[in-house]
Amino acid sequence: MAARRITDEPAYILHAYDWSESSLILDVFTRHWGRVALVAKGAKKPTSNFRPVLLPLQPLRLAWGWAGEVGQGEIHSLKGAEWAGGHVLPTGDALIAGLYLNELLMRLLAREDTHAQLFDLYAGVVRVLGSGAHGEALEPVLRAFELLLLREIGLLPALDAETATLSPLEPATRYALVAEGGLRATGEGERAALAGAQWLALQRALGEGGAADYTAVLRAVAAAGAPAAAELKAQLRTLLQYHCGSPLLRTRQLMMDLQSL
């Protein structure tokens, strides 16, 4: 089969691996092709045009040769890379948060499985990280992305009903989101739980803006989750780790060690 050439594809680098003394294997997230593995030959050489461009959390336009069938998970050859501009590389807490999102995508998304809406959401969050957002401004955005990621890959239950019984949530009753049981009512004193009214607000926010207005959805979910960010964080982190499997996310361990997020 003749090789095809993909050009001008919006992409972000999730991770880079050493392949040889002079080359890299890139795990990239693209808008139209999903996660793709690319080999960047000679990218580690001081004279390489790739060297200053292939950075994480930067919007890129990539070109590569595609030799096999879509869905075969092959490693393709990078032919071109340009910085698409827009923002600087995040630093500090925002950088660690961005690397955490990258690790989630690598652990949860299959190769060559397209998620165009998720790509746009990710790009929006990366712009927030590049703007210097941190602390209280950063946390709601991270929680919103985690919720939207889980929904995109089919791992988020409806947030307006108790999962086991499909009974509508009671606004004053507290519910927890658990890995194998979805939303369930909790006993008194259980810390990682939200009131039914808060879950209902998140469910409404997930439908904000229509299917194409990703910025509006992200903003609405972040606003709805902000009042209970700590409780929501604990539940989502446990749920995401369950679906990622072992070992513990490396960026999660780093954040725990630094006590930053």
Image (tube, rainbow, N blue to C red):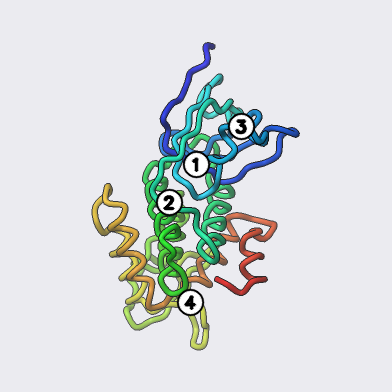
How far apart are the two marked residues, 2 and 1, measured between alpha carbons? 10 Å
The x and y percentages for residue 99 are 56, 55
- Which element is circle 1 on? strand
Q: Earlier in the sequence, mark 3 or mark 1?
A: 1
For residue 48, which numbered disc appears in the image? 3
Indicate which label's residue lies in the foreground, 3 or 4.
3
The residue at which mark 2 appears reads as: 122
How far apart are the two marked residues, 3 and 1, measured between alpha carbons? 22 Å
The residue at which mark 4 appears reads as: 230
Q: Mark 4–mark 2 contact, CB under 8 Å?
A: no
For the residue pair 225 and 235, the one nearer the viewer reads as: 225
Q: Mark 3–mark 1 contact, CB under 8 Å?
A: no
The residue at which mark 1 appears reads as: 29
Q: Earlier in the sequence, mark 2 or mark 3?
A: 3
Q: Name the residue: 44% across, 51% down.
A: 154
For residue 144, which numbered disc appears in the image? none
Q: Say what amino acid the circle numbered 1 marks.
A: Phe
For the residue pair 122 and 118, the one nearer the viewer reads as: 122
Q: Say what amino acid the circle numbered 4 marks.
A: Ala
How far apart are the two marked residues, 4 and 2, measured between alpha carbons? 22 Å
Q: Earlier in the sequence, mark 4 or mark 1?
A: 1
The x and y percentages for residue 237 are 55, 66
Residue 158 vs 134, above or below: the answer is: above
Quarter of the view holding residue 47 = top right
The x and y percentages for residue 222 are 36, 66
For the residue pair 51 and 109, the one nearer the viewer reads as: 51
Quarter of the view holding residue 67 = top right
